[in-house]
Amino acid sequence: MIWLTWRQFRIQAWTALAALAALAVALMITGPELTRLYRSSGLAGCRTDCESLASGFLNQVINGTTGPLYWLGIAVMFVTPAIIGVFWGAPLVARELETGTHRLVWSQSVPRGRWLAVKLLCGGLVSMAAVGLFSLAVTWWADPIDSAYLNRMFPEIFAARGIVPIGYAAFAFVVGVTVGMLLRRTVPAMAVTLVVVAAAQLAMPFLVRGHLIQPVEFTTPFQTTAVKSLQIHDDGTITVTGRVSQPGAWVVSNRTVTPSGVTFTGPVNTEACSPTAFSQAGCMAWLDTLNLRQEAAYQPANRFWALQWYEATVLLALALALAGFSSWWIRRRLA
């Protein structure tokens, strides 16, 4: 059974190895030069006021030949789990059910549960290993740039680093197998799998990740000397937010409230903050008279690996739950 599964799965496995080898070559060629630039920039030993050093290093890197490779690495880590679910997971069972070849295996004294378990185990392990190696290579190579950007906690970077991509790979693969088993049609299963995996990648940072560990919350008087953004709208309302001075942190929520605790939206003082005759000094002076407060919550940068483990565990638990459901379905419901 293992040999048969490998025969059915070997093309995908060799494709993953070839892609990994190509990526590894590109990273090995450019990695040493990237590390040298980082060390020569002085960032490695910098502890305070490092913005100018980081800016100089990033200008060298991002505007050079390694810039496109950096963004490509992020894109690859986001797209690969979806590819695994669509092209590895969905057809693995759906194609056999669609063509009827599963009956031949079941008639050879191979229990349905074992048939599915071998497919899930072999395909899942190859998927996790391939994405794990991808992530290891990309995380190592991009570490100097991430250290300069201080952006590892940001949603667009977090899921492309560390061990979280392994969890997404396992989840996407099992989703594909489960959907394929339920629909019994390869092409529809591939389409539904893509939608489910993409929805999970969007829902996790916005609905789940920020609550895996209780965020650090604070309330402080609003400082007009540290305004992050200010927008005056046509309907006479105003939106203003303050900066959160936590380098590398992921800001989960950030709002400006009135003394009564209501989100501040104006109305705007047209004499001080008129859209047609805006005066920054006058507008800031007017805001100072309102006794506003800043309420914010954030995940500090030192929680990166803790959140990585929590999120990977959630994804693996979902994958195991789907595998258990698939096992029940194939033994009890699939004719």
Image (cartoon, grey):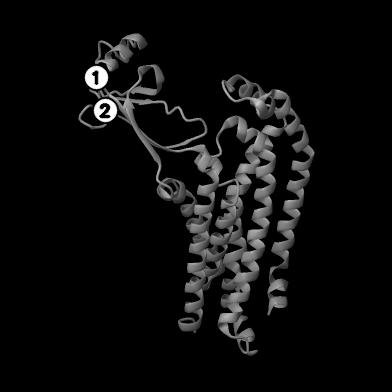
Residue 89 seen by the camera: yes
Of 19 and 118, nearer the camera is: 118
| Mark 1 surroundings within 10 Å by alpha-carbon count, few (fewer than 14), some (14 through 19), many (20 or more) | few
Q: Could you tell me residue 153's position as x and y percent?
A: 52, 40
Q: Residue at the spot x=40%, y=24% of the render?
A: 229
Q: Could you tell me residue 44's position as x and y percent?
A: 67, 29
**Quadrant in the rendering for residue 16:** bottom right
Q: Where 106 falls versus 17 (above or below)?
A: below
**Quadrant in the rendering for residue 6:** bottom right
Residue 100 seen by the camera: no
| Residue under numbered circle 2 | 264
The kind of residue on which mark 2 rests is: Phe
Q: Nearer the viewer, mark 2 or mark 1?
A: 1
Q: Residue at the spot x=55%, y=62% of the render?
A: 190
Q: Could you tell me residue 258's position as x and y percent?
A: 24, 27
The kind of residue on which mark 1 rests is: Leu
| Quarter of the rendering occupied by the N terminus | bottom right
Of 314 and 239, nearer the camera is: 314
Determine whether, in the image, residue 148 is placed left or right of residue 212: right
Q: Where 303 falls versus 218 (above or below)?
A: below
Q: Secondary structure at mark 2?
A: loop
Of 149 and 335, nearer the camera is: 149
| Residue under numbered circle 1 | 290
The first of marks 2 and 1 along the sequence is 2
Determine whether, in the image, residue 131 is placed left or right of residue 227: right
Q: In the rendered structure, are the residues bearing label 2 and label 1 in contact, judged by CB atoms less than 8 Å apart?
A: yes
